[in-house]
Image (cartoon, rainbow, N blue to C red):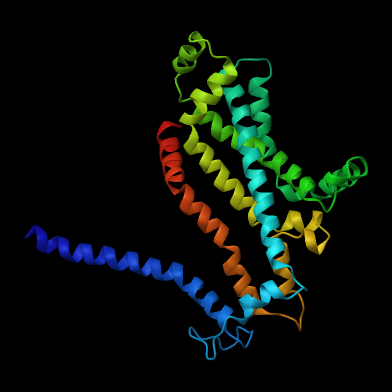
Amino acid sequence: MFRRSSLPRRISKHLIIWVFIALVFFPIAWIFSASLNPANTLIGQELIPPNANWDHFVNLFTNPRHPFGRWLLNSVKISGITAILTVAMGALAAYAFSRFRFRGRRTGLVTMLLVQMFPSMMAMVALFLFLQRIGGLVPWAGLNTHAGLILIYLGGALGFNAWLMKGYFDTIPRSLEESALIDGATPFQAFIWIILPLVRPILAVIAILTFIGTYGDFLLPSILLTGTEQYTFAVGLRLFIVGEFDTRWGIFAAAALLGALPIVIIFLLLQDFIVSGLTRGAVKG
């Protein structure tokens, strides 16, 4: 009797799961269909378009009007460097706030959290003028430079990420560091060789979230990057649909699919750390 009653329940669960899977993959299939459609339009779009071909994908890398490969590399470079530096700076700040007691510690934590409450759009003019002034002193870090964009990203990502890491550092017993210090290690060596290996899950979570946030950002790069060769993937993608009579949905769909590959690859490489970091952080924090 138990098996008879559980069979309909199992069928209903599997049915719900497959419905959600279909809802997730249907937009992807539709975009892939549009990328193969030689009509270069979304009007009358079919799931399997007639005369489907790969011309849009070839055009992405052969047309000199849009250096798509360079845009993709620019996004990966900017997002990768930002993620690495954000994790490094956030880990150092979180360790200091978690382990040390100093004047202004609580005020600093609250200030970092309050700053994150204001939307970044409020500071767009100030950031533009800031990089314009910096460019006069340090040309490689001014407007229309990747270094300047990375500098802005680092300033905006430190506060919230330091808060997340601090909560994770607080769950690690101090006795581990004290044992390392007794054995002759310096505080920095204890941080590098003892603490960091234990917090790898949260470091991976911060890295992937930072990478995704900077990789898909459009507003800030569109303001601070003015040269076509310096564009990121998100900014360059807009050029395919910006004109009233030059809207190319087919090549736009092909570019969107290829642009999603770095995110998919990073998720596949870091999925174990992401799951353990989120679950352990939820239990401990």
The front one of 73 and 200 is: 73
Q: Is residue 130 left or right of residue 219?
A: right
Residue furthest to the bottom in view is: 50
Residue furthest to the top in view is: 182
In percent of the image, x 54 and y 91: which residue is there?
Answer: 51
Q: Position of residue 142 (x, y in %)?
A: 85, 47
Residue furthest to the right in view is: 136
In percent of the image, x 64 and y 77: which residue is there?
Answer: 58
Q: Position of residue 246 (x, y in %)?
A: 75, 81
Q: Position of residue 79 (x, y in %)?
A: 65, 50
The front one of 162 and 187 is: 187
Q: Quadrant of residue 229?
A: bottom right
Q: Quadrant of residue 278?
A: top left
In percent of the image, x 62 and y 88: which residue is there?
Answer: 39
The front one of 152 and 198 is: 198
Q: Position of residue 186 (x, y in %)?
A: 57, 14
Whether 61 is drawn above or below 148: the answer is below
